[in-house]
Image (cartoon, grey):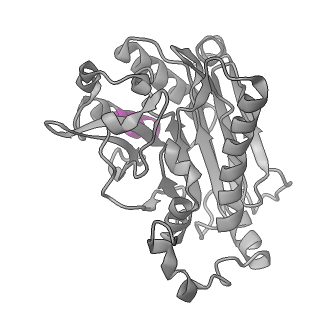
Amino acid sequence: MSEPLSARLCGRVIIRPPVADQSEDQIEHKSHSSNDRTVTVGLIQMSCGEDPEENFTRSTQNIQTAASKGAQIICLQELFCSRYFCQKEDVAFFDLAEPIPGPTTDRLSHLAQELQVVIIASIFEKRAPGLYHNSAVTFDPSGERVGKYRKMHIPDDPYYYEKFYFTPGDLGFQSNSTPYAELGVLVCWDQWFPEAARLTALKGAQILFYPTAIGWLEGEVEETNQAQYTAWETIQRGHAVANGVFLAAVNRVGREEKLTFWGQSFVCDPFGRVLARASAEEEEVLVVECNLREIEETRRNWPFLRDRRIDAYGDLSALFHK
């Protein structure tokens, strides 16, 4: 992939190393321990047009760009093949859904094998007639699907009318093993729930990925817009800190009908430090190194998992206690 093409497709290609300087031993990819290596993640932040095939083609080109820059684990934004159709309730949009496996997942499987990378992709899944999910699939470098997650938390807010389209997930929270790292995939609205991040981390995930579609409503005041964005980033950085993991959030960007998606995809480390953040307005391929050794180092000094009082958390199973 030539540099002019990557610039045309995504505006900028950003590459960030880990925050701390690392020795050659620390960044050796062939470490004996999955907790003792540097892995490189790639986030694809895009705007989407009306043609799903064109969106897919541009996404695959951006995946190739990320891989050429060294990305080993590449994540696309939520519902990357289409515009964010949930701004209104229209049965015609169900035609965008497809089964898993299906045409899109088949092509992504082949691409993962061709590039020898892990690909995480958000799919509008048709499970059965009248039964649909907002799902995410993970393919390893062999092209095998090693994970399928169905979005558990489904919003129903102005211009986010997802309950009309998606049945809540029934596959639970999970960690998927890949040659590069243990990955936990959640989707958009899930990012506001600390329980989802905790349970995924407890399954062994070293990096939490959140394919996302979130933006500002038309007509909101700037103070409200900035408060919403700050809350969005803050709570996810808190998940990284509370669980001692890396976290990657992949948002779309640009105006679609009543929403302006705020982009700013980012990766943070187990201290919640942002290693790299994409633009609020431009398409970007964000390539970031994550030193998994930091998970062990952080958890030794901040042993939140050790000090959890699991005997006292039973009340969390209730919706409310009043």
Taking the spot 35% from the left edge, 44% from the top edge, the residue there is 143
Position of 172 relative to 51 (above/below): below
Image quadrant assignment for residue 134: top left
Residue closest to the far left: 129
Q: Establish if 135 lies above or below 83.
A: below
Lateral position of residue 221 relative to residue 207, left or right: right
Q: Is residue 196 above or below residue 66?
A: below
Give yes or no for residue 72 being in the magenta stretch: no
Q: Residue furthest front?
A: 322
Q: Which residues are magenta?
A: 108-116
* Residue 233 or residue 19, whichever sits in front: 233
Q: Which percent across, then down, holds residue 76?
A: 50, 34
Name which quarter of the figure residue 89 lies in: top left
- In the displayed image of the protein, which residue is found farthest to the right? 21
- Locate residue 150 relative to residue 127 in the image: left or right: right
Residue at image coords 30%, 57%? 170
Residue 254 visible: yes
Residue drawn at point x = 46 percent, y = 66 percent: 319
Does 115 lie within the magenta span?
yes
How many numbered discs, if any?
Answer: 0
Q: Residue furthest bottom?
A: 311
Residue 109 visible in rendering: no
Residue nearest the viewer, comparing 136 with 310: 310
Q: Main secondary structure of the magenta part?
A: helix
**Residue 284: image location, x then y, percent:** 65, 24
- Which of 318 and 127 lies nearest the eye of the viewer? 318
**Quadrant, the N terminus:** top right
Position above or below: 165 against 3: below
Residue 24 drawn at (x, y percent): 78, 57
